[in-house]
Image (spheres, grey):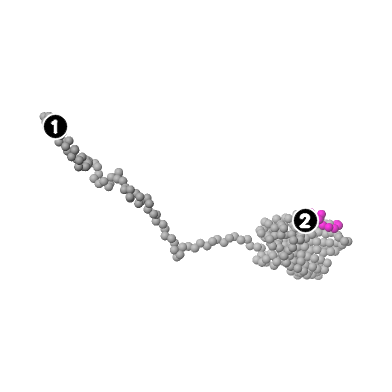
Amino acid sequence: MSPIRRGSRLAGATVLVLTLLATGCSISTDEEPSDASSSPSAETSPAETETSSTATPTLDPTPTEATATPTTPAPSPTVAPPTASGPEAALLAATELPGLNDTYTWREQRTGPAGTAPFGICQKFDLNSIGAMDTRERVFTGDGGSAGQQIADFADPQTALRATKVLQSWHQDCRSRVRGRNVVVRPIENVAVGSGSAWHYLVSYRRGGQGHFESFGAAVSGTRMALLRIAHTGDDHNYEPGQDPMELAVQAAAAKFAR
């Protein structure tokens, strides 16, 4: 092969390359895909990217009145009182209060809100001072005797029970606070009742040459409490077991709680 022909071939190849570069053509091989859109390196246009990232999500439609399910609020828990009526309705009538003997009768003297004076010879404070919310009182009178009853409602059974403990603690140091001679404070005796608890005790003393007796009783059920006092003068206070007027009065008061 002569030098002249080789130079001619090189010169021709050079011209071909320069021509392709000048026309903007590219050299491709059979292994490259012919469709540019299917290439893995194909990029999404900026406009398409912005539209895709800022698209507003589709929300569920607002339920209509026909399909909406109304919500009924749950009722608030309440604590029902032991009876459907107020405390005054639980007071004993004069005919319901046991007498000092078979022929003894009581007369109703006054009914209304309880005062602030202690109720009973051993009591230090009134019931409102130890947690009662509403207290009613009925006063009775009879030949040679007097009696009274209070009905009190408390906020909850726990407060009512605490008030009972306070009343019993006043019984323990009652003797030193009674004005008179030969003071005797008998022990607390429990009373059988249908619901709740009940008890009573007797205080006796002499004053002005005369004997005095005062019985005190209490019954509590739930948030309600009944207090009773019966006082009389005389030389004795003797009754058969289960026949003491205060024991019977406490049972009658406790029976009113269930009505």
Q: Name the residue under label 1.
A: 7
Residue in the picture at 25% in, 46% down: 35
Q: Is residue 50 magenta?
A: no
Closer to us: 1 or 214:
1
Q: Identify which residue is drawn at 85% across, 58% down.
A: 180
Mark 2: give few (<14), some (14-19) or many (20+) Cα within 10 Å: many
Q: Where is residue 203 in the image (x, y as percent from the top left)?
A: 81, 59
The quarter holding residue 3 reads top left
In terms of depth relative to the viewer, which is nearer, 173 or 136?
Answer: 136
The type of residue carrying mark 2 is His
Tally the marks: 2
Q: In which quarter of the image is the C terminus?
A: bottom right
Q: What quarter of the picture does the N terminus occupy? A: top left
Q: Quadrant of residue 239?
A: bottom right
| Segment tinted magenta in the rendering | 172-182
Residue 21: x %, y % from top left: 20, 40
Point out the residue furthest to the front here.
22
Task: From the viewer's perspective, tell me whether residue 67 is left or right of residue 169.
Answer: left
What residue is at 74 percent from the left and 69 percent from the top? Answer: 93
Mark 1 / mark 2, whichever is N-terminal? 1
Taking the view exactly as shown, the residue that stands out farthest to the right is: 209
Give coordinates of residue 139: x percent, y percent.
Answer: 76, 66
Looking at the rendered structure, the secondary structure element under dot 2 is helix
- Binning the other alpha carbons within 10 Å of mark 1 as few (below 14), some (14 to 19) or many (20 upward) gives few
The residue closer to the viewer here, 203 or 68, is 68
**What residue is at 68 percent from the left and 61 percent from the top?**
133
Q: Can residue 215 be seen in this view?
A: yes
Disc on res. 121 = none
Label 1: state its secondary structure: helix
In-image side of 41 versus 5 (left or right)? right
Task: Judge depth for marks 1 and 2 and give the one in front.
Answer: 1
The circle drawn on residue 171 is 2
